[in-house]
Image: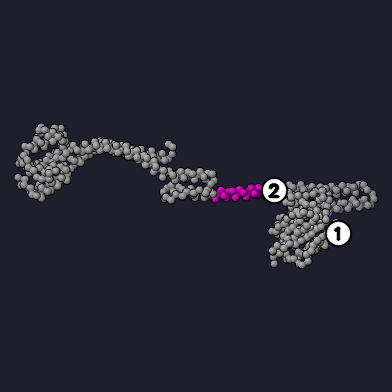
């Protein structure tokens, strides 16, 4: 609490207020009386000059006969400055009292001892204060009046004496009372001020705490919180700056995350490519190892004349030729797949009859169909025109049909269907036989992947055909897939039939 800004503001303001009150009390206690006395001396001096000017200007006769206008003027001087004015000539005294506001005549002998001209008659504590050569100012105590006075006594050139008096006791008492009152008021004001300042300071510290909370949220990467202050002071400027900082940080972090995501993706792709390269080399090595070993073995047998009869030599030669053809076929497929994947084999879109293409493919595999005693079903008769690269689509359907022939079993049925879906035609090749395990459906498109390796080896498959299908359909921006049915497996692809 004592380290909070609110406490510090309250403490500093209350301390400053208390010091100001204490300073006022000290000044009031120590200097108010002197200041007031100097003010009174100055007032007596200016009053003397006014009375002197009036006497000289009015050309008052020696017996001090004043006109009503002159009396009014003298009374104004007396009452306005809270003083008593006595004018003395030829032992005759005229008193113009501030309270009576009237002319009063009295005997000069009374004035001499009552008003300080002849001290000793009830006059004590006489203290000289000021003199300018024309008049003297002094303070004294009058026991007959039981009061302290400040008096001015001066003599004009024509012999007229001017005596001016003002009470001095009241200011001394007032200064003491004012000092005590100021002390009491200071204590009350300090207490109340402390309470008021403590609560008012909340208005200053609240936006600062809000900014602190915003900065904490920003450190936690929460950029939704914003400063909502509507003032125009320095705190509002800071708040608006933090809002701009929050937006820029959010944008920068978003860009960094995007860049990091892209980098992670690139790294993942690189890792995947490296893995694919390793798998590719491993698979190619594995696929080529067996035929190369067979070719090498049978060639060495022929070289060593292991079998002398013509029929055995012919068998050796047939094995070598068959394995060489398998290797050549696999290499060609790899080259084809490489060209498609790297965009070297450009897609040439053209409009052709899909029905005629399928019948041409079926005619080319008719011998295999009859050898395996497969029932081939394709009932489409009317032309169906599509937009695609005819050579590539022929490769796709040929791979589907060959794959079906290699895996057909049971009822030995292969069915080819064309399913229309708006502007798209789906080519579906179905064969009866064993289903593909559900967990391996997505893997059949991977290069060299074989669901049944023994059977694939039996018919000389390399596991590249379906990878070529996937690459060709991707180059056409079209979909392909595989679905398990109750009695077999269906491979499909979609082509654009929009006119």
User: Which is in the foreground here, disc 1 or disc 2?
Assistant: 1
> Disc 1 marks which residue?
370
Tags 1 and 2 touching, CB below 8 Å:
no
Label 2 packing within 10 angstroms: few (<14), some (14-19), many (20+): few
Q: Earlier in the sequence, mark 1 or mark 2?
A: 2
Q: Which is more toward the observer, 255 or 233?
A: 233
Q: Is residue 13 left or right of residue 453?
A: left
| Magenta stretch contains residue 261 | yes
Question: Which image quadrant: the C terminus?
Answer: bottom right
Separation of residues labelled 1 and 2 (CA atoms)? 43 Å
Instruction: Identify the secondary structure beneath mark 1.
Output: helix
| Magenta stretch contains residue 133 | no
> Disc 2 marks which residue?
272
Residue occupying the point 8% across, 43% down? 104
Residue occupying the point 11% across, 36% down? 116
Give x and y (percent) for residue 38.
20, 39
Give x and y (percent) for residue 136.
14, 38
> Residue 89 falls in which quadrant of the image?
top left
Q: Is residue 16 visible?
A: no
Residue occupying the point 49% across, 50% down? 244
In the image, the segment drawn in magenta is: 251-272
Label 1 packing within 10 angstroms: few (<14), some (14-19), many (20+): few
């Amino acid at each position: 609490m004592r380290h909070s800004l609110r406490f510090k503001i309250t403490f500093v303001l209350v301390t400053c207020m208390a010091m100001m009150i204490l300073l006022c009390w000290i000044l009031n206690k120590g200097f108010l009386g002197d200041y007031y006395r100097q003010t009174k001396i100055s007032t007596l001096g200016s009053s003397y000059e006014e009375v002197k000017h009036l006497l000289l200007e009015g050309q008052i006769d020696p017996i001090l006969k004043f006109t009503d206008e002159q009396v009014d003027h003298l009374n104004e001087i007396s009452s306005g400055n809270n003083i008593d004015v006595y004018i003395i000539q030829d032992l005759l005294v005229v008193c113009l009292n501030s309270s009576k506001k009237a002319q009063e005549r009295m005997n000069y002998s009374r004035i001499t001892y009552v008003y300080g001209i002849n001290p000793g008659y009830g006059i004590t504590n006489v203290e000289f204060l000021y003199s300018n050569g024309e008049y003297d100012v002094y303070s004294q105590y009058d026991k007959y009046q039981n009061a302290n006075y400040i008096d001015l006594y001066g003599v004009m050139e024509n012999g007229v004496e001017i005596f001016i008096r003002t009470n001095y006791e009241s200011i001394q008492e007032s200064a003491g009372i004012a000092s005590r009152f100021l002390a009491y008021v200071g204590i009350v004001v300090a207490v109340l001020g402390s309470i008021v300042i403590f609560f008012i300071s909340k208005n200053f510290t609240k936006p600062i705490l809000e900014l602190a909370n915003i900065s904490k949220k920003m450190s936690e990467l929460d950029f939704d919180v914003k400063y909502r202050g509507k003032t125009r002071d320095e705190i509002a400027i800071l708040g608006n700056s933090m809002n701009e900082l929050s937006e820029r940080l959010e944008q920068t972090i978003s860009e960094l995350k995007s860049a990091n995501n892209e980098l992670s993706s690139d790294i993942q792709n690189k890792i995947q490519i490296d893995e694919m390269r390793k798998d590719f080399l491993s698979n190619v090595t594995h696929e080529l190892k067996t035929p190369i070993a067979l070719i090498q073995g049978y060639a060495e047998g022929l070289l060593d004349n292991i079998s002398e009869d013509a029929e055995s030599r012919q068998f050796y030669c047939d094995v070598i030729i068959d394995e060489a053809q398998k290797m050549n076929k696999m290499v060609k497929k790899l080259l084809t797949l490489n060209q498609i994947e790297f965009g070297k084999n450009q897609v040439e879109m053209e409009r052709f009859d899909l029905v005629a293409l399928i019948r041409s493919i079926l005619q080319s595999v008719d011998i295999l169909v009859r050898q395996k005693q497969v029932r081939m079903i394709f009932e489409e008769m009317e032309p169906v025109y599509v937009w695609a690269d005819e050579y590539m689509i022929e490769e796709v359907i040929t791979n589907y049909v060959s794959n079906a022939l290699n895996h057909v079993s049971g009822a030995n049925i292969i069915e080819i269907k064309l399913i229309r879906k708006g502007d798209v035609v789906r080519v579906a090749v179905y064969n009866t036989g064993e289903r593909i395990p559900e967990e391996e459906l997505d893997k059949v498109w991977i290069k060299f992947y074989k669901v049944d390796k023994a059977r694939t080896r039996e018919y000389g498959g390399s596991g590249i055909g379906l990878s070529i299908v996937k690459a060709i359909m991707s180059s056409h921006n079209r979909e392909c897939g595989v679905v398990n049915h109750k009695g077999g497996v269906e491979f499909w692809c979609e082509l654009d039939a929009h006119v």
